[in-house]
Image (cartoon, grey):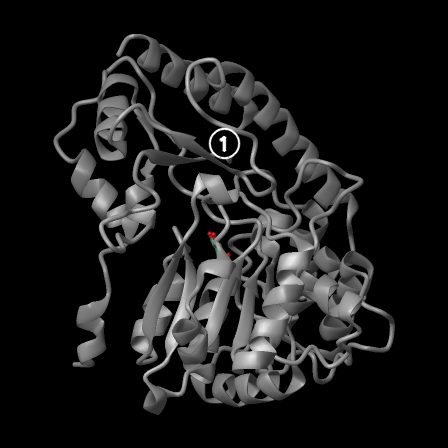
């Protein structure tokens, strides 16, 4: 067996199951899960139609590079969404389709890490668990940057020692963050690009929540925006990860893309060719329909806005919780220990949340997720309101 497998941590949901095992929720309460970040809004009908219209493509082997039409749709989307000047992105070299960002983040890490160098994969803490597992299986050492409230839930990049930058091979960014919802500001992105040049590392920007934001007039910037503003037309050392899962409520389609530095993508394409993860042609055709339409994405944001407004009105008077910059999570402070809160809330109200400490690692005695829980507002409005009312009642009676 691969000895690195033994380094993998139990997934947070496994720990959660163990935590809640044996707890007896009140029989008169229906279960409400705020634990899983699975979008629940309706998938767009026109995407489902495009998929069924192309089922004859089941007879075709897809290529790893994907259809030129899909890559061009993605380029068009990047240009309009992140103000990338026309002509900078070449659909043949700067874009690759991926079967969701989860597999892409994993495979990308295997492509980029140089095992012989004993390098670091640097990530926020708390973090999306794939960054860590991918680093360990690639033979790199994960290095965690705490995301604390006093820094707006972003890492304090100025406090990172030079030795860490020197050993860094990949810097993972997650903006808007899971679970914090924090956005990395544009000036910080620009500063990180300068550091990547100075210390020769790759920035892997996980932006799969980028289309879930609250102010229609202010879409969050991404790493491509920073490249555009810097005149960095080759996107050197910069790679972004985007997905239809949250943007378009298509988590089951398994469709996303990776875009940026053409040299890195060339190596990634080679890795993927052997890895065997080409996107099925019918999925590509459905994805083109999704990337070409913004109306359903705006409607999706409207639904989240309505839910955040309603839930925060109920929760803000009873707990320390704020509207995030983006995404669909609340990152709320618990009175006392987050695991105790999670277990007691489940037993009393049959509402499931994720303890923040399960999404973070303890470094130097500090777990930056401790004392917080993550709540995903993915369920329908009425269910989110019901969950918030139960949490408020639980907090008032404890
Ligand atoms: C931060 C983050 N990145 C990536 C993913 C993977 O999403 P997908 O593989 O559906 O694109 C998720 C899913 O929850 C996530 O929270």
Q: 257 or 139, which is in the foreground?
A: 139
Q: Read off the residue under disc 1.
A: 379
Answer yes or no: is residue 52 visible.
Answer: no
Which residue is at a point 49% across and 77% down the rendered structure image? 277
Residue name at image x 48 percent, y 87 percent: 271
Residue at disc 1, secondary structure: loop
Residue at position x 40%, y 14% in the image:
392
Residue at the far right in the pictured view: 86
Q: Residue 53: where, in percent of width, then height?
A: 70, 61
The residue carrying pointer 1 sits among few (fewer than 14), some (14 to 19) or many (20 or more) residues within 10 Å by Cα, namely many
Q: Residue at x 46, y 83 (%)?
A: 111
Locate the N terminus and report the quarter of the image it occupies. bottom left
Q: Quadrant of residue 68?
A: bottom right
Residue 128 percent across, percent down from the top left:
41, 56
User: Does residue 210 sit above or below 310 in this rendering?
Assistant: below
Query: Is 102 located above or below residue 67 in the figure?
Result: above
């Amino acid at each position: 067996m691969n000895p690195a497998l033994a380094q993998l941590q139990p997934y947070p949901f496994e720990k959660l199951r163990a935590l809640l095992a044996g707890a007896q929720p009140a029989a008169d309460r229906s279960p409400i899960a705020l634990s899983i970040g699975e979008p629940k809004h309706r998938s767009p009908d026109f995407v489902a139609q495009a998929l069924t219209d192309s089922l004859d493509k089941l007879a075709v082997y897809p290529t790893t590079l994907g259809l030129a039409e899909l890559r061009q749709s993605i380029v068009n989307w990047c240009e309009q969404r992140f103000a990338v000047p026309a002509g900078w992105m070449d659909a043949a070299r700067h874009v690759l389709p991926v079967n969701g960002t989860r597999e892409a983040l994993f495979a990308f890490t295997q492509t980029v890490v140089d095992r012989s160098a004993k390098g670091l994969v640097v990530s926020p803490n708390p973090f999306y668990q794939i960054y860590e597992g991918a680093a360990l299986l690639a033979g790199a050492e994960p290095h965690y940057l705490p995301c604390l409230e006093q820094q707006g839930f972003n890492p304090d990049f100025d406090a990172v020692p030079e030795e860490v930058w020197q050993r860094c091979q990949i810097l993972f960014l997650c903006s808007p963050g899971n679970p914090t919802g924090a956005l990395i500001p544009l000036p910080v992105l620009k500063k990180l690009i300068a550091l990547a040049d100075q210390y020769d590392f790759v920035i892997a920007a996980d932006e799969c929540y980028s289309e879930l934001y609250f102010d229609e007039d202010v879409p969050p910037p991404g790493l491509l925006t920073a490249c555009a503003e810097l005149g960095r037309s080759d996107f050197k050392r910069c790679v972004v990860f985007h997905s239809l899962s949250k943007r378009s409520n298509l988590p089951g389609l398994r469709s996303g893309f990776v875009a940026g530095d053409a040299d890195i993508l060339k190596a990634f394409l080679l890795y993927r060719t052997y890895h065997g993860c080409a996107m099925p042609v019918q999925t590509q055709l459905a994805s083109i329909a999704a990337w070409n339409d913004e109306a359903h994405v705006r409607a999706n944001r409207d639904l989240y806005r309505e839910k955040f407004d309603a839930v925060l009105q109920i929760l803000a008077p009873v707990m320390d919780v704020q509207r995030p910059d983006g995404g669909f999570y609340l990152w709320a402070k618990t009175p006392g220990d987050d695991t105790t809160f999670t277990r007691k809330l489940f037993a009393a109200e049959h509402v499931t949340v994720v303890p923040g400490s399960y999404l973070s690692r303890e470094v130097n005695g500090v777990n930056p997720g401790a004392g917080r829980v993550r709540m995903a507002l993915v369920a329908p409005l009425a269910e989110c309101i019901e969950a918030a009312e139960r949490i408020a009642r639980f907090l008032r009676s404890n």
